[in-house]
Image (cartoon, helix red, strand yellow):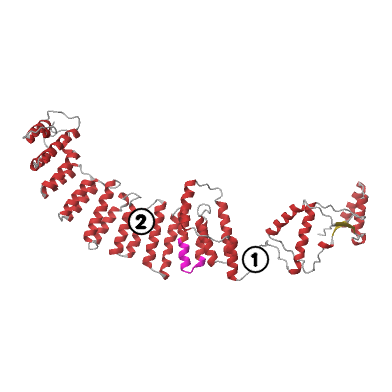
Amino acid sequence: MAAVHPNSGCIDVPRRNRGCARRVCIDRTYRFKSTDDAAQVWCSWVEMELRHDCFDEALSVIRQAVANTPNTKGGLHKSLRLWNLALDLEESLGGFENTRASYDRVIELGVATPQIIRNYASYLKQHTHHEQSYTVYERGLELFPFPHLGALVLWTEYLTNFEERYGGSKLERLRDLYERCLDPETSPSQDDISNFYIRYAKLEEQYGLSKRALSVYERMCTAILSSPSKRISYELYISKATQFLGGGSGLSKIRPIYETAISSLDDLDAAKICLSYAALETKLGELDRARTVYTYGAQMADPRRFDGYWKEWHSFEVKRGSEDTFRDMLRIKRAVSAAFSTVNYNAAEMTADDADDQKNNAKSLTDAEAIAMITKQEGIQPKRPTIGGFVTGKRGADDAGLEVLERQAARLRGAGVNVGSGGDGDAVAHVSKSAAVTVNADAGEIDLDDGTDEEDDDDDDVNASSTAVTNVEMKHVPAGVFGGLAAGSATESQGTVPTMGALARLQASKATDSNNTYVNYD
C-alpha cells in the first residue's frame, strides 16, 4: 500500500504513508507470521523516508524499531536486518558516540557477526582510535573463537593492523598475540595454522632474533600433522636454517633437522627429504655419508612409484662412485623391487607421483653404459663375474680353441650321439681333425664362464638338435691301456660274477672278527 502512494500523484505522500506505517508497525493492527516480516515493513518505512529526503525522520524510525521497550514483542530488537540498517544510518547520519553506542548494543545483545566486528574496528581506526579498535577485536574473538571461521578473519586483521602500526616497537606484546593465536588448545585448523606460523617467523626475522625464528619454524613442523604440508614445512625450515647458518661448517648443524624430518614423515616424503640430505652431504664433500643416506632412503622408495630417487642415486654413482659402489646400488635396487613386489597402488597415486618425477625427467644412462663410463674414468677393465670358491683360469690367446671344443662337445650332446662299445667293452668318441685342439698342461685350472656363455651354449644346443653329424668315427681302445680294469670289465661283460654261499660268508666274517679282536688287559 505504501508503494502505491508515490505513483498516485498525491501531494502529501509522506504523511499518508506514515499513517499507514504507524497503524501496522506501532499500533500493531496486523499480526505478522514471523519477526522477519515485521522487520521488512520497518525497513520499508525507513527507505520511504530516505527517498523523500527525510533523514532525521528515517533515523528516528530505525532507532524506534531496534529499541527494547515494553511494547516490543517477538524479539524485533534482535533482528539482524534492522540492526544492519540502523548501523549504516548511525555511521552516515548519527554522531561518533551514537554509532559507538549502537555497535556496543549489538555486541551486548549477541547479534553481532564477524563482519559487524570488522566494521566497528574499521570505524574506530578511521577516527584514530586504534587501541579501542584492538579492544573490539578482543571482544569479537571472545564471541567467535576457533574453530569458528570468523576467528581466522578477525585474528588476521588484528595482527595485521597491530603490526602495521607498531612494527617492532611493541614486539613483546605482538609476540603474546601470536602465542595466544597459536595456543594448542584453541589453535586454528591444520589448513590455516601454517600461515600464522610463517607470519610469526617472519616477524622474528625482521625485528627479532634468527634463533627465535628457527624455533618458530620447528614448532610449525611439529604442529602440522598432514603429510604433504608437513614435508613442505620441513623444507621451508631447512632452507631458512641454511640461510641463517651460512655456508661451510655451519651447514653441518642442519643434519639433526634432516634426521628429525626423515623419522617423522611418511615413506614417500621421507625419501624426498633423503635426496635433499644426500645433496647436502655431497656439497660438503662427505661422499660416504651421502651414499649412506641414499642406502637408507632406498628402503622407502619403491622403484615403480618413485623412479626419480633411483635416477638421482644412479647419477651420483656415475659421477662420484666406483664400479663396486655402482654394483651395490644395483643390488639394493633389485632387493627393494622384490620387497615392494607385493604392494599394489591405485592409478591415481601412480599418476600423481609420476607427474612430479617428470618435471625433472632428464635422459639417464643405462646400467651397462654407466659401468663402461666408470671403468673408463678409473682406467680399469671391467671384471668378469665369477662364482665364489673357484679360481679364475689362466686364459691366453692359445686357449681360444678350448672354448670352440667345448661348444662342439655341447653340440654333440645335444644331437644325441651314441657311443658304441669296442671289442673290450670300452670305446671313446673320436673327433675329426677339423675339431682337434691341443691343450697345454698349464691350462689345468678351472674357469667358469659367465651367464652369457651359457646362454650361447643353450642356443647352440637348440640349433644342433636339427643338424646331422657325419664326421664322428668309432675306434677300439686296446685292453692293455686299462690294466686290471679291463679284466674286471671283461668279466662283467661275460656275465661270470663269482658267487659265495651262506656258510662261506659266515666263515669269512668270523675270520675277520678274530683278526680284529680287542683284548682288554685292565
Instruction: Answer yes or no: is residue 498 visible.
Output: no
**Spot occupied by residue 194 in the image (x, y as percentages of width and height):** 34, 54
Q: Which is more toward the observer, 101 or 350? A: 350
**Spot occupied by residue 299 in the image (x, y as percentages of width and height):** 52, 55
Instruction: Answer yes or no: is residue 84 visible.
Output: yes
Specify the quadrant of the image occupied by residue 390: bottom right
CA–CA distance between discs 1 and 2? 52 Å
Q: Earlier in the sequence, mark 1 or mark 2?
A: 2
Residue under circle 2?
220
Q: Find out whether residue 278 is within the magenta segment.
A: yes
Report the magenta residues as a range: 276-288
Element assignment for label 2:
helix
Looking at the image, residue 431 sits to the left or right of residue 196; the answer is: right
Report the mark closest to the observer, 1 or 2.
Answer: 1
Residue at the far front: name it: 9
Q: Find out whether residue 310 is within the magenta segment.
A: no
Residue under circle 1?
383
